Amino acid sequence: MPKSLLDSKVTVKKRKPRGSLSKDAIVDAAKELLHEQGIDALSIRKIANVLDAGPMSIYNHFATKQDIVFALVEDFVARAHQKEHSAMNWQEWLHVTFVDIFTAFTNEPEYLMLMISSNNIGVASKNVFDDALACLMEAGFSSEKATIAFHKLLSFTLGAAMMRANLSQATVESESAAHNVMKGSQFDTSLRDIIVGLT
């Protein structure tokens, strides 16, 4: 005799109760998705699935997916630029700061495309820019020359990080000296040369 519907046990996955999510939990879930599946995996629905929540509960904290991207970028930049370098001279400060940025992208390359595709630099990125400009202006650069210098350093650092990320994913039978340079083996020396050349 078949079991009735009342006798059978059905497992229903319960969603988190309304109001139990936080912005931090959502950003952490988005980080997990970004790290494991890349930028294309970032969607409200997938983030909600990671949290066992409904998509509407995400919208209680973030109006759009782009707002979550901004939060991810902010978190990444804040982690990449958390050291105090105030006791250093301006050249060493710039060197350590941009090595920190390059290292952060090396450790978490998934953030590179996320930052490049973001149309909002955010407070944390603006703080890095302001700190670098202040450092350069204290060293005697005009506001305009300090901005140009920052652009050179940032462009070089992002370009080097992008080459490294692309080459790290490629399968290469023998790594030549040129290949190692493009992966960043000379980043430190090249960065120092650029900083010296700013004067």
Image: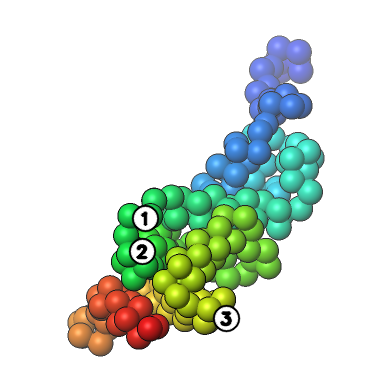
In percent of the image, x 74 and y 46: which residue is there? 62
Q: Nearer the viewer, residue 80 or 92?
A: 92
Q: Position of residue 39 (x, y in %)?
A: 57, 61
Residue of label 1: 85
Q: Position of residue 151 (x, y in %)?
A: 51, 78
Query: Disc 3 on helix, strand or loop?
Result: helix
**Taking 34 as reference, is 15 left or right?**
right
Q: Given the image, on which type of amino acid does mark 1 rest?
A: His
Q: Nearer the viewer, residue 146 or 188?
A: 146
Q: Nearer the viewer, residue 91 or 155?
A: 91
User: How many C-alpha atoms fall within 10 Å of the one at disc 1: few (<14), some, or many (≥20)?
Assistant: some
Query: Disc 1 on helix, strand or loop?
Result: loop
**Residue 93 disc label:** 2
Asked where in the image residue 92 lies, by quadrant, the reply is bottom left
Residue of label 3: 144
Q: Is residue 72 above or below residue 109?
A: above
